[in-house]
Image (spheres, rainbow, N blue to C red):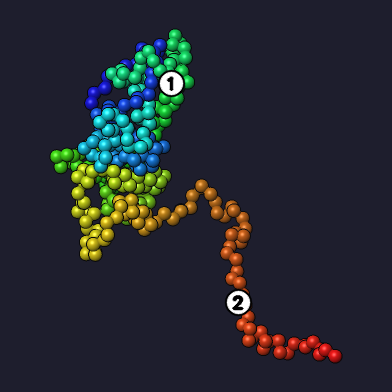
Amino acid sequence: MTLTLTPLAAMAGARFRPPEHFGFAASLAWIPVNDTEFHLTSHHLPLAVRVLGGMPRLGALVHPAFGRRPAVDAAGRWQAGYRPLALRTHPFVLSNRRGARPIDEIDVVSDAGLVGPWGMPVCADPAAGTLSAEMAGVRSALLAMRAGAVRLSAALELLRITNVLVPLRDPAGAPAADHTVDPGRLAALDEGAAAALAARSFLPLDLAAALAFSRRHFHPDRLPQPSARSAATGAGREEPRPAEPADIVLAGLEAMNFALDGSDLFDILAIGDLSEFAAPPPAEPAPEPGRARKTGEGAARAPAAA
């Protein structure tokens, strides 16, 4: 789908309103997802990795051919629950231009029909190009999405290097442009590969778990066939009960070694006296009743009552 973008500065005196119908989302097919929302999104939409400009990007697939349930109904109503930021900031996107004013950094999808004479003002001062409070909030969200995309791309690149991303299948059965996590490959990673994924942050493993969890939202025919590598991990074993992909990931995480190495994050020797952190000594067992009587046989007895 080709979008017609216009600098927002050319519409400084206009007003805008948020989208109420989301038929355009199905046309986009894939919408970007931010690093602050991918956990929540995975509960409502299938996550997929798409390579754009040579960099892996995280998004949600909303094309009706890929999901178990359409994200948008025939009337254009959103029915997938959570709406990612990219939909809530539509029709605005950040441009690659640098300008003296914040308005110069923003483009608008002009054919979306959401900028016109009604709604909230684009600018508090159109002559100066000063954004309104509402538009400034949209710009802040767009900037957060751009920064989040950089962090996500770095983490997704590690997943791509470890070869745990596999292509989905398009309606014709051929490999699609979008990828998901192969839970079997992820669970088969050795300790060194798992440690490398988490060397700088746990974001790569968080992403892998979210991608695997969201596979439940894909139509079964769109999921990749189990790879030979995944099948080899279960060769010679009894056929297991059906399990959710997330269960496979969590089972693999339990077997991975995440022991902390010495670092300058904290110095254990600088803590001081470690005895206060030691476990308390075991309590002495109570004496047996019979033994207590025997021990007390030699004790002085109270004088008998007169």
Q: Is residue 237 above or below residue 98?
A: below
Q: Residues within 10 Å of mark 2 (few under 14, many from 20)?
A: few
Quadrant hosting residue 131:
top left
Give above or below for 154 relative to 237. Answer: above
Q: The residue under label 1 is which amino acid type? A: Met
Which residue occupies the extreme right position in the image?
Answer: 306
How many angstroms separate mark 2 from mark 1 (CA)? Answer: 72 Å
> Who's the residue at 61% across and 72% down the image?
283
Q: Amino acid at mark 2?
A: Pro
Which of the image's four quarters has the C terminus?
A: bottom right
Relative to the observer, which residue lies in front, 276 or 180?
Answer: 180
> To which residue does mark 1 refer?
135
Q: Quadrant of the N terminus?
A: top left
Taking the spot 57% from the left edge, 64% from the top edge, the residue there is 279
User: Who is closer to the viewer here, 259 or 253?
Assistant: 253
Task: Give whichever of discs 2 and 1 has the lower sequence position.
Answer: 1
**Which residue carries the number 2 mark?**
285
Q: Residue at x 43, y 21 (%)?
A: 135
Query: Which element type, helix, strand or loop, lies under badge 2?
Result: loop
Residue 24 image position (x, y, % from top left): 27, 27
